[in-house]
Structure formats: structure tokens, C-alpha cells
Amino acid sequence: MNVFDELESLYNEIDQNYSSVEFEARAKGWHVKEAKYTRKRNLNDQAYFLFMFSRLEDHIRTESANLICGKKTKINSWKQRAAWDILPSSAGNSQLPFKKRLALLVEKGSSDFNLIVDYS
């Protein structure tokens, strides 16, 4: 089981626990307790989304850096390599914004690109 499967399992366990308490509170008319657990579920959703998206951002930075480095070393013609030479190859380098790194890996304007941009 990889870390994402484990996180999904943990997320589901926590969400089900909160959901159960929230449902019980709703059934008994305990509105304050219901609101408390609704809030906890929303925060849990946001926390897991933020963590998972940060993993995606890191993966995009790493893969774009690998692509740039590969192009810089494998292309022999300076005319073709020139565009790649001006790009920062380090994944930690903030000179190349996230959306531009993403555009190196996913077609700009595609549904995947737009979805990731909407979430960022």
C-alpha cells in the first residue's frame, strides 16, 4: 500500500467517524454539536486536499526540472537547446512559476491543465 492509499484510508476513517457523530446529533436535534462536526468534516476535507495538492505541486516541479535537465543534456543542436538553456532546471527554483512548469508537462488549455490551475 502506498502513502496515498494509506492517506485515503485514514481520511475515510476520520470522515466516517465525524459523519456518524454529525448524523446522530442531527437525529437528536443537537444543532450545536451537529454544526461542530460539520465544521470538523469541512476542515478535514480542506486539510487532506491541501496536503494532496502540495504533493502534486512537488511532483510537477520535480518532473519539469527533470524534463528541462534532460533537454539541456540530450539536445545537440544549439538552436533547439537554446530555449531549454534559459529555463531554470532546479525544482526548487522559483524563477519558473508553477503554471509554466505545468505547461511543460500538460498541454496548456487542456481540461487537465485547466482543472489543476483552477485548484491552485
Image (cartoon, grey):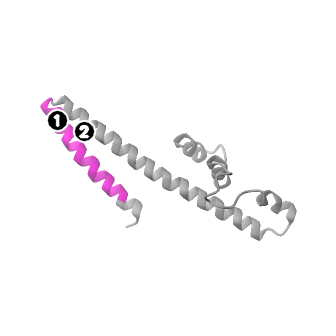
Q: Residue at x 27, y 50 (%)?
A: 14
Q: Is residue 22 magenta?
A: yes
Residue 42 vertical position relative to residue 32 in the rendered view, above or below: below
Q: Which residue is mark 2?
A: 37
Crowding near the residue tagged with mark 1, few <14, some 14–19, many ≥20 C-alpha atoms within 10 Å: some
Q: Residue 27, located in which quarter of the rendered image?
A: top left
Tell me what residue is drawn at x 76 percent, y 70 percent.
74
The answer to if 12 sits in the magenta stretch is yes
> Which residue sits at x=59%, y=61%?
62
In the rendered image, the quadrant that contains the C terminus is: top right
- Residue 52 shows which numbered tag? none
Q: Tell me the distance, in whole angstroms, between the alpha carbons under discs 2 and 1.
A: 9 Å
Q: Amino acid at mark 2?
A: Tyr
- Quadrant of the rendered image containing residue 8: bottom left
Span of residues in magenta:
7-29
Location of residue 66 in the rendering, given as x and y in whole percent from the top left corner: 65, 65
**Mark 2, residues whose alpha carbon is within 10 Å: few (<14), some, or many (≥20)?**
many
User: Which amino acid type corresponds to the residue marked 1 in the rendered image?
Assistant: Ala
Report if the CB atoms under discs 2 and 1 are less than 8 Å apart.
Answer: yes
Q: Looking at the picture, how far across and down is residue 36, in whole percent?
A: 24, 36
User: Which numbered disc flags the more N-terminal residue, 2 or 1?
Assistant: 1
How many tags in the picture? 2
